[in-house]
Image: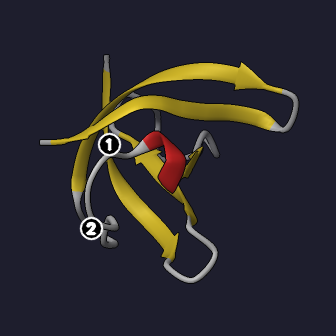
Amino acid sequence: MTEGTVKFFHDRKGYGFIERNDTDDDADDDVFFHMEDVGGPDLEEGEEVRFEVEEADEGPRAKNLERI
């Protein structure tokens, strides 16, 4: 599993992006997530999470997302 920090979250639309801890700062490898991937209350920007990455048509997407 990969760890990261919620970089952006749009609470009305229920999606956001996670900045991965395992990439270089220069790399733009943010991972998309949707609240359907998260159990429980909305995530907040700056929250630490653990997740698996799957390749979707639009790019990397988090699955099995959990708070740390």
Amino acid marked by disc 1:
Gly
- What residue lies at 56% left-to-right and 68% top-to-bottom? 14
The answer to whether 47 is drawn above or below residue 23 in the figure is below
Q: Position of residue 25 (x, y in %)?
A: 47, 46
Question: Of label 1 and label 2, which has the lower sequence position?
Answer: 1
In this rendering, position of residue 35 left or right of residue 22: right
Quadrant of the image containing the N terminus: top left
Q: Position of residue 52 (x, y in %)?
A: 43, 21
In this rendering, position of residue 18 left or right of residue 16: left
In this rendering, position of residue 65 left or right of residue 40: right
Residue with the most extreme right position: 57
Q: Secondary structure at mark 2?
A: loop
Q: Position of residue 57 (x, y in %)?
A: 87, 29
- What residue lies at 43% left-to-right and 64% top-to-bottom? 7
Residue with the most extreme left position: 68
What residue is disc 1 on? 4
In this rendering, position of residue 46 left or right of residue 57: left
- What residue lies at 32% left-to-right and 42% top-to-bottom? 4
Identify the disc placed on residue 46: 2
